[in-house]
Image (spheres, rainbow, N blue to C red):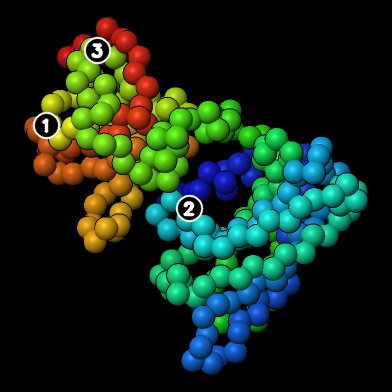
Amino acid sequence: MKHHPVVLYIFLGLFFNLTASRKQVNFLNESKRLTHAIIQGEVRGNGSLPIEDRNSHLLVELRLTRDDRPQSIARTKIKLHNNSATRSFILHFKLKYPLSKMNPHNSYVLSAKIRNGENKLVYIGDLPVPVTERKEEKAKHLIINVIETPAWHSNIAKLDLLAYKVTQLGGTEEAFTSELYTNKKPGIYTCVVCNSTLFSSKHKYNSGTGWPSFYQVAVEGNVATNVDRKYGMTRTEVHCDKCKAHLGHVFDDGPAPTYMRYCINGVTLQFYDDKNEMK
Ligand SMILES: [Zn+2]
């Protein structure tokens, strides 16, 4: 089982500790009209927050974590003020989420993230939430450590609108619009967000679909997949394992030897000439 990168980041920095506790989970009464549940809790800090301006905030988010691909269910943003930057502080939050989005087979995480005025992530922490238990639960504690924002994180803000929509929101570029579709030069294709090596010209072929197509990935493990049931179809979504950027889909109607067809949005890729990748 893979860990969401957020969980990994927790081990990267060890400078401060924050604790978040879920004080209580109040579900609305067991009436037939039960539509929403409310989580109330607090994030406690033992350290000075780097509050630089009025845009510093705490984001508390309930996320679905199934298949290693986080999906936000509910979130609340709390503005931080200079008086919350003291060494010991408690920030209260209240999160309301629709039960219609809940599935007992999924797992959920409550995360607390603090961003400074430049929207840079400075604190982060996760707490697993057993959301299917509709009763009050005992408070649980969570250790949150300061993290270093991944170097690629600032690249997200620099993406053009289409690349943002495709990589961050799971969109699709129009067929036959990417100049990489007909690119036959030897080289490697990397992720437009984090520059991780994803595909090679060695495995590229003309699928006739209008999207750059490969019959295998360049580096095993750099590309991850997920079941996608959008639009009434069951497809296998493909994303960058490192930064979770959506890339496209994979189908089993490709050529030998793998018979796979990685159908990739060109806008998610950067191409680098490299004669070593000659077929
Ligand atoms: Zn990436």
Tell me which amino acid carries mark 2.
Pro
- Measured from the top left, where is residue 48 in percent x and y? 86, 44
Res. 87 visible in picture: no
Of pointers 1 and 2, the one earlier in the residue sequence: 2
Which structural element holds mark 1?
loop
Q: Are marks 3 and 2 in contact (CB under 8 Å)?
A: no
Q: What residue sits right under mark 2 in the picture?
A: 70
- Measured from the top left, where is residue 187 in percent x and y? 29, 14
Query: In the picture shown, does residue 24 fall above or below 157?
Result: below
**Image quadrant for the C terminus?**
top left
Tell me the mark number nearer the camera, choosing from 3 and 1: 1
Extreme residue in the top direction = 275
Tell me which amino acid carries mark 3.
Pro
Query: In the picture shown, does residue 107 fall above or below 156?
Result: below
Q: Which residue is painted at 51% across and 88% down in the image?
A: 33
- Specify the quadrant of the image occupied by residue 251: top left
Q: Which residue is painted at 52% across and 62% down in the image?
A: 73
Tell me which amino acid carries mark 1.
Gly
44 or 56, nearer to the observer: 56
How packed mark 2 is, by other alpha carbons closer than 10 Å (few <14, some 14-19, many 20 or more), is some
Residue 186: which numbered mark, if any?
Answer: 3
- Specify the quadrant of the image occupied by residue 61: bottom right
- Specify the quadrant of the image occupied by residue 9: top right
Extreme residue in the bottom direction = 31
Q: Do the residues labelled 3 and 1 touch (CB within 8 Å)?
A: no
Residue 208: which numbered mark, if any?
Answer: 1
Which structural element holds mark 3?
loop
